[in-house]
Structures are given as structure tokens and as C-alpha cells.
Image (cartoon, rainbow, N blue to C red):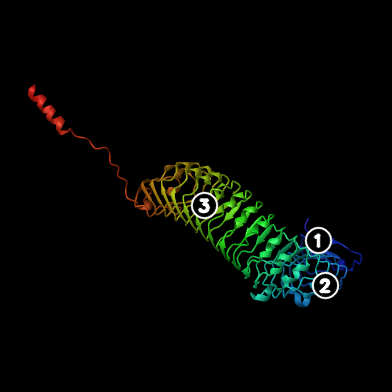
Amino acid sequence: MLLVGKIPAELGSLSKLQFLFIHANSLSGGIPQSFDTCGTEWNGLSGTIPLSLSNLSSLVSFDVSYNRLHGNLTSNFRITFPNLQDLGLSHNRFTGSIPVSLSNASNLEYFSINYNNLTGKVPSLEKLPRLQFFSVTTNNLGYGELEDLGFMSSLTNVSNLEVLALNDNNFGGMLPESIGNWSTKLAFLFLDGNKIGGSTPAGIVNLVSLERLEMWENQLSGSIPDDIGKLQNLRYLMLIENNLSGMLPSSLGNLENLIQLTLRRNYFQGNIPSSLGKCQNLLFLDLSLNNLSGPIPSEVVSISSLSISLDLSDNRLTDALPSEVGNLRNLGVLDVSNNMFSGEIPSSIGSCTTLEFLSMKGNSFQGSIPSSFSSLRGIRNLVLSRNNLSGKIPEFLQDIDFKSLNLSYNDFEGMLPMKGVFKNLSATWIMGNSELCGGIPEFHLPKCYFKGPKKRGLSLALKITISTVSGLL
């Protein structure tokens, strides 16, 4: 049963009250004056935090997340809680900046103030040696300037830190070299959605407990550290949409616990390292929108654990697609579009029976659509446009439940099927195939004319023979 109404003011008079947990209800109104432990998150509380709370030196935990509280924290919330261990203010409407008085909570272990409207800088955290969790996700902190990350130098004193989440703010500046001296317990580092520039400090590889490193949508430059492979506990490495360049280090192959590697939309060049084939726990690999070249290593398309997506699109990859691609039997998305591949489409793709999306557009594939594609019964989107494919469009395609089928700008010929997806003009693209005919009238293709076998007349020699015999009779 959900509690409704306001929190009784009389609760604030219970001088011996130590713990009160009333989270996940439908309470409204303001917060009573005093609790030693206050858990009122997931309600509908409004108003401001009472100034009298600043007098509660015995306060251990204060969590009012997921409410409608507001007010300027800089002027209305002074932290004087030496025993405070947990402070949760997330998902409210607070403004101002993070109070400098946060350093008074010397026993603080957990601090979360996500999804508010905070601005300004993060104060020094050097007096919070017990801090384990610090998250300020989705605010407007920082000014997009060099000094925004100045507080990071104080993290060398926070030896118990396990989670640091600064994502989706306005932080500028560069990561400090002192990152190599941060807590070796740090497991989760979220810096995405900011304006952080400069190169990645080499010392980041000292954070050997890192499991998740997300620095996407920033302005990072330079290359990935050559010895990134030292982070052997890393499970997620996400560097999407930066200005990173250089070769992909072969030591990426040492990250054998890696589940997701996303390097999309950077300027990486050179070959894809075959050592990636050792990452046999990968579920998601995205190297799209870079300047990678050369053939796809057969080891990479032999990572049988890949089940979500393999995206190598928009690079300069060459040669034939390795037949080992058939090892990706659990894969849902395969995108090799807009490269320089040639040769025939491997028939082994027919073994990838869990595919739902396959895009091979913008290459130089030739030959016909493999008959093995008839095994791709779960595929919903197939894009083969802008290649050199030829032959007839297989009739089995009309038996597959496509959402979209794009065969445009190839050299297909003959009669266009008329059932299944081929009945849906908005889901089928076949333009740019000048030798196609038939199909539903909406495609405006010419009629198909089938030339039957020619009736062969009698040969001249046979006619002469018959004439001679007739003359002798």
C-alpha cells in the first residue's frame, strides 16, 4: 500500500528517532525538520530543504532523490554533517553549485546529485578520504574551459573511490596526468557528453580495476595508449565521437573480458588488429566511421560471442569478405556498408540465422544473391544497394518477412517477384536495375516478354535430299 499525504511535522520532534525509511510512496509537501537517517526518495515531495537540517550533526544518511525539491544549494544548503555517509539529491530541481561545505562531511561514502540544474565547478574532494561513489550526471556543471577539471587533482587523496560519473555536463579542460595516481579501486569512469579535450594520459592504464570506461562525445585527440591492454578487467570501452587517431593498438586483444568496444566516428587508420580475435566475450563491436583500411582479419569475424552488433561501415576496408563470417551464428546486426569490398557475397552468411539487419551497400560485391540467404528467416532489413550484383532476384526473398529490402543500383535482371515484401512499394527499393521487368504496376517496370524457342525450318541440305529422292520415285 502506498502512503499518501504529507509527512507529519511531529516526526521531527521524535528526538530518539534514528532511522526512517519512507521511500517509494506518494507523499507530498515539505520535509520535517530533523531526522538522523532520512530516506524519502521516490515520493512527490516539493519545496526546499529546511535550513534546520544543517544542525543535525548526527545525520548519517540523507536521500531525497526522485522528488520535486528545489532551491539554490549554494545559499540554502550548508553541509555540517561530520557523520554523514550517504547524500542523495538526484532527480530534483536544485540549482546553484555543489556546496564547498561538502568537504565537511569527512565520512561521506556516497554522493549522488544527478539530473538537476547545477552549474559552476566541482569543489575539491581531498577531505573526503572515504568517498566511494561520486556522481553528478546530467547537470550543467563546468564552463567548457581549461580549469573545469581542476578538482581532479584532489582525487589522488580519495583512495577508496570506485565510481566517478561526470557525464552529460559542460566540462572542458584536459584529463590530468595525475589520473595514474587515482584510486586503484576505481571500476567505473563516466566522462561522456562533455567538452574534454587533449590526449588520454598514459597513466590511465594504472587504473587496473576499471570495468567501464566511457569517454564518448568529447573532443579527445591523440591515440589510444599502446598498453591499454593492461586494463584486463575492462568490460566496456566506449570512445565514440572524438578526434582520436592513429593505429588501433594490438594490445586491445589483451582485453579478454571486453563485452563492448565502440570506437565509432573518430579518425583511426591502418589495419584492424587481428588480436581482437582473442576477445571472445565481445557482444558488440563498432569501428564504423573511421579511416581503417586493408582486409578484415578472419579472426575478427570468427568471434562467435558477437551477438548484438558488428559494425565496420564507412571505412576503407578492402578485399573479399572472409568466409569465416559464417561463424557469427548468434549475431543480430552486421553492417559492412560503404567500404571497398569486392568478390562474391560469401554463402556462409546463410549460417548467421539470427541476423535481423544486414547492410552491405556501397561496395563492389558481384555475382548473385547466395541461395543460402533463404536460411535467414529472422532478417527484417536487408540492404544490398550500390554494388555490382547481377542475375535474377531470388523468389525466396518474397517468403521472408522483411520490413525493408533495398536492392537498388545493381545489375539485376528478369522478372521482379510480386509477393511478400515486393507488394509493398514503400518497403522495397529496386531502382537503378535497368534489366528488371514485371512486378506490381506501382514499380512502373516494363512488361516481361519471354521469347519461346524458335521453330527450326528444314535445312537446305535436307531439302535437296528430299527433292532428289522425290525425283527418283
Quarter of the image for the C terminus: give it. top left
Q: Nearer the viewer, mark 2 or mark 3?
A: 3
Q: Is residue 190 visible?
A: no
Q: Nearer the viewer, residue 98 or 227?
A: 227
The residue located at (14%, 33%) in the rendering is 460
Quarter of the image for the N terminus: give it. bottom right
**Label 2 residue SS:** helix
For the residue marked with disc 3, what is the amino acid? Answer: Ile
Crowd class of label 2 (few under 14; some 14 to 19; many from 20; radius 10 Å): some
Q: Vertically, is 395 above or below 96?
A: above
In the image, taking residue 148 as reference, residue 429 lies left or right, namely left
Q: Which mark is residue 296?
A: 3
Q: Quadrant of residue 219?
A: bottom right
The residue located at (78%, 68%) in the rendering is 157
Find the distance from the CA under tag 3 to the CA under tag 1: 56 Å
Q: Which mark is residue 258?
A: none
* Of the image marks 2 and 3, the number of the one nearer the N terminus: 2
Q: Which residue is mark 1?
A: 22
* Of the image marks 3 and 1, the number of the one nearer the N terminus: 1
